[in-house]
Image (cartoon, coloured by chain):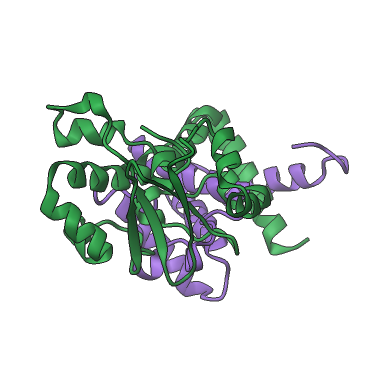
Chain colours: A purple, B green
Amino acid sequence: MSRESGAGELDGALAPPMANGEVVFSEPWESRAFAMARQLCEAGLYSWDDFRAQLIAAIDAAPARPYFESFLTALEALLASRALVTTAALDDRADQLAARPHGHDH
Amino acid sequence: MSDTEDAQLRAEALESILVEQGLLTHAQVDEVIVRYNERVGPMNGARVVARAWVDPDFKASLLRDAASAIEPFEFDGGQVDKLVVVENTEAVHNVVVCTLCSCYPWALLGLPPKWYKDAPYRSRVVREPRAVLQEFGVTLAPSRKVQVWDSSAEVRYMVLPMRPQDTAGLTEEALAERVSRDAMIGVAEL
């Protein structure tokens, strides 16, 4: 249990933002990205160490990028490397969502 | 479009694709969020409380220097360097707030609940703690003092609730199950 705290075994430079006790998730999508990464790991699609390695690479590639954007980038890269979700499919879907009529309530 | 909006769209896109592929469901994602918010985090604090209930020496060191006392638990997550644990008694009920933002001992209690971060709780609990506690369902005897602790970046507080009467003979593990997050913030009694 002690290794299963809310950070999902990410510590040091890999820990989510938590300075001054500020909210770990500042936007709903951040909590959903975190939960997706945990759920797919628990479903056995990859180990948390696999994810951690991708996260290290994503943070190294853009140290100034907000934490959860790197987190999402890491998840995308891991799923692409396992041929589970291709970058092209994700780009297409994101474009479709972006093209929704303005004011779409989601 | 900003990078944040872009990330938001990509996260939504990713979830919709994963759901279509049968790799996860929206409900599973919701469930993980709830688990991390409400159980995994607060369970660390609950274990500390249960230990204090069964081990007087631990309780004494916890109330004296909480950060050192919890070191053997090896909790992840940080934010407990300057932790102060305040004990509820028949004479005093403690409640924790962060009036400036949302400082919170999250390695012990997980992610702060939404109301903890909202302005009404942050401002009102200082002015009228009894009324706020009443809204949480906690009615205090007039003779019982209410002590409000304002967390900051320097010091985080956690409440040590009183051990319920009907728990004699329970194991430490079973006791931990009885401890709620809200009781450790001080807005619930056990």
Q: Residue at x 12, y 27 (%)?
A: B169
Residue A51 appears at what percent x and percent y? 38, 54
Image quarter where the N terminus of chain B lies is: bottom right
Q: Residue at x 56, y 49 (%)?
A: B116
* Residue that protrudes farthest toward the right in the picture: A102
Q: Residue at x 18, y 35 (%)?
A: B173
Residue A18 in the image: above or below residue B115: below
Along the line of sight, the residue nearer the viewer: A47 or B163: B163
Q: In this view, does A94 lie to the left or right of B93?
A: right
Residue A64 in the image: above or below residue A94: below
Image quarter where the C terminus of chain B lies is: top left
Residue B122 appears at what percent x and percent y? 61, 54
Q: In this view, does A102 lie to the left or right of A45?
A: right
* Residue that protrudes farthest toward the top in the picture: B166
Residue A87 appears at what percent x and percent y? 58, 51
Would residue B39 be seen by someone viewing this image from the given angle?
yes
Residue B48 in the image: above or below residue B2: above
Residue B187 appears at what percent x and percent y? 48, 41
